[in-house]
Amino acid sequence: MQIVIIGSGFGGLSAAIRLQAQGHNVTILEKRDKPGGRAYVYEQDGFTFDGGPTIITAPWLIHDLFTLCGKKTEDYVKIIPIDPFYNIRFEDGLVFHYNSDREHILRQIQAINPADVDGYLRFAQAGAQIYEKGFELIDTPFTHVGDMLKVVPDLVRLQAQKSVAGFVNQYIKDEHLRQVFSFHPLLIGGNPFQSTAIYALIHTLEQKFGVWYAMGGTGALVRGMTQLFQDIGGKLVLNVEAAEIVIDERNGRATGVRTENEEWFAADTVVSNADVAYTYLKLVPSRFRRKNTDRKIKSMEYAMSLFVIYFGTDRKYENVAHHEILMGPRYKGLLDDIFKRKHLAKDFSLYLHRPTATDPSMAPDGCDCWYVLSPVPHLGGDVDWTTMAKPYRDAIMQYLEQRYLPELSKHIVTEHYIDPLHFRDTLNSYLGSAFSVEPLLTQSAWFRPHNVSEDVPNLYFAGAGTHPGAGLPGVMSSGKIVADMIGTSPEQARQHELVMG
């Protein structure tokens, strides 16, 4: 079967490798000059900047791809564990060193608030129960309402109706520790005070399997997966942007992809790793979308966007870890500004990434490679980034210099930034959202855009906006779901499409 995949992010690559390994003829169409999607790599003045995800969890999902193709991961990319996972720093000077050493975590909790030691142990036990059930669903498609009804009793038992923060706060009382154990939804574009408590499983996932790094950066993982795809016969076409998924007027099935420069790629099946909302609104003509109408797509809630500054320094800051979470003066109030009011606040919480703490190859000798990431509202608010980007950049860099990176301005030797306009215009993400559909309970599992279109039976979706959601484990699992649904033969795929109606 001829399969065309739009986009070469981790979801698209995961689906492509699995489908090519099944024996299909797979072609990936990529808009940019390099694969990776949001995991694009910028190379500038001798520095290597990972454009997107930098935190690797669930490493077996990576190894499974190489094993499936009779290959070894280490022959393509080297993945190593990170310790600490994160340093979480607060403005009053408190630092929480977060890793998988239970005794180390308990000692820190004891020092901060002894009364929360027992609460943490109960939280960890409850989180483990969520993990055991929730991770079963990560590569299970939810294409029928019956799929959802089967798991409702478990979701109720696991308190899925609560937010992650609400779930954590019933066990832990100290405000610092509440933030330490509830911030994780931000890694997948969610508000800890709105995202379903199912995402509390991230804590257990990290505790069980660690946080990992690909030597050479996340881009090295993209290159390794791309090489694997090509080694087994897959085809990657760069610098070509999809303009339309062409639908047969007679039967409503996709017949291929037309590009902006009028190239034609015929397909028996199309997989979109592009943003789900963008795919429906821009690539599938409205007359073929009885269910996924413009109104329905635009009525969903979309995740936050990001402002990210990539910079290199001609000195090293050895006291800064690979991953630093810098908590600002407000927690819930700032999140309300970002997610509810869509307001650009004057304060911020930041993720500071220093890969040279682990991998000196990312920068010239004696230098450090960085990015600093600030969650910001998507473009549904009233922020004018054409005028606000520069002052916002200046405020962040001044904050870093004053609190964490002394004399930073004197040592920056290269720099660039991206803002929500980049996510909208370059990455084709609706409203400039960095994570697509927001991970709410009412937008999860069956309620999330499905992995196969209800309108076009041979159009499938992999990536952040479909089930199971954003983050490396989510998008890679979406690729597996798609490959399993399409199956190993045209007959299997056709049977599935007939069932979908």
Image (cartoon, rainbow, N blue to C red):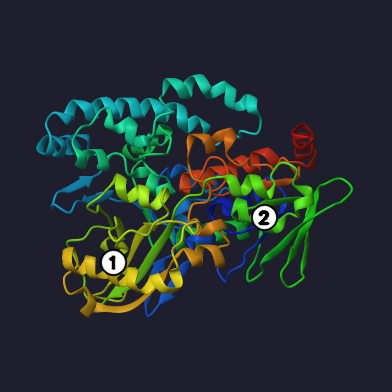
Instruction: From the viewer's side, name the closer residue of 357 and 92.
Output: 92
Q: Which mark is residue 31?
A: none
Q: What amino acid is labelled 2 in the image?
A: Leu
Label 2: how many Cα within 10 Å (few below 14, some 14–19, many 20+)? some
For image coordinates 33% across by 37% down, the residue present is 203
Observer-nearest of 447 and 97: 447
Is residue 30 visible in the rendered image? The answer is yes
Q: CA distance from mark 1 to mark 2?
A: 35 Å
Near-viewer residue (132 or 91): 91
Task: Give coordinates of residue 351: x percent, y percent.
Answer: 31, 57
The answer to whether 312 is drawn above or below residue 114 in the figure is below
Determine which of the numbered discs, if any, sits on residue 281 in the image: 2
Q: Residues within 10 Å of mark 1 (few under 14, many from 20)?
A: many
Residue 328 position, x and y percent, is: 24, 54
Camera-side residue of 131 and 331 = 331
- Which residue is the site of mark 1? 396
Describe the element under mark 1 as helix, strand or loop.
helix
Q: Amino acid at mark 1?
A: Ile
In this picture, residue 426 sits left or right of residue 57? right
